[in-house]
Image (cartoon, rainbow, N blue to C red):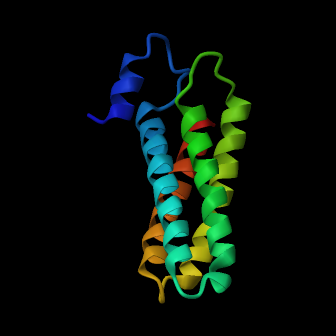
Amino acid sequence: MTTVKDMLATYPADLGGVDPNKLTKCIEECIACAQACTACADACLSEGMVRELAKCIRTNMDCADICNATASVLSRHTGYDAKITRAILQACATACTACGDECAAHADTYEHCRVCADALRRCEQACNDLIQALG
């Protein structure tokens, strides 16, 4: 079991009918994506072409913040509000799409951008899957 899954399993109340597997996957992908984006932004800062990577750095930093916030919101269940959950999931998926497109544009040149783009696509999919599960 993962820590996320373990914590969800110990929650003393109902999760509001949310699919625990999709919720676990989404939280885990958000955390992984935030780490990948932070590391990619840092790697971009170490490249010789920093000026050309400014947009990539910025989108990585923004996306990392949004993914971290999403994981935090998804980890809280007391007073659950489906509208807020849906809105932050949509924001996260949108940020992952934009950042994924930016990283993919540099993926042939920078391996860290390719790895990050893969993490972004997985997180985007996990957010969209959870949105669908919310109904």
Q: Position of residue 105 (x, y in %)?
A: 58, 83
Q: Which residue is rendered at x = 44% and y = 10% of the image?
A: 12
Q: Which of 48 and 25 is in front in this view?
A: 48
Query: Is any atom of residue 98 visible in this view?
Result: no
- Number of disc labels: 0
Query: Is any atom of residue 70 visible in this view?
Result: yes
Q: Which of 25 and 65 is in front in this view?
A: 65
108 vs 95, left or right, is: left
Quarter of the figure that contains the C terminus: top right
Q: Position of residue 97 (x, y in %)?
A: 63, 65
Q: Which residue is rendered at x = 51% and y = 48% of the image?
A: 30
Quarter of the figure that contains the N terminus: top left
Q: Which residue is rendered at x = 49% and y = 56% of the image?
A: 33
Q: Which residue is rendered at x = 51% and y = 82% of the image?
A: 47
Q: Position of residue 85 (x, y in %)?
A: 66, 35
Please identify the quarter of the rendering in which residue 79 is found: top right
Q: Which residue lies furthest to the top in this view?
A: 12
Please identify the quarter of the rendering in which residue 112 is found: bottom left
Q: Where is residue 106 in the image (x, y as percent from the top left)?
A: 55, 83
- Taking 74 as reference, is 106 above or below it? below
Q: Nearer the viewer, residue 36 or 82?
A: 36
- Taking 7 as reference, is 63 above or below it? below
- Taking 103 as reference, is 123 above or below it? above
5 vs 129, left or right, is: left
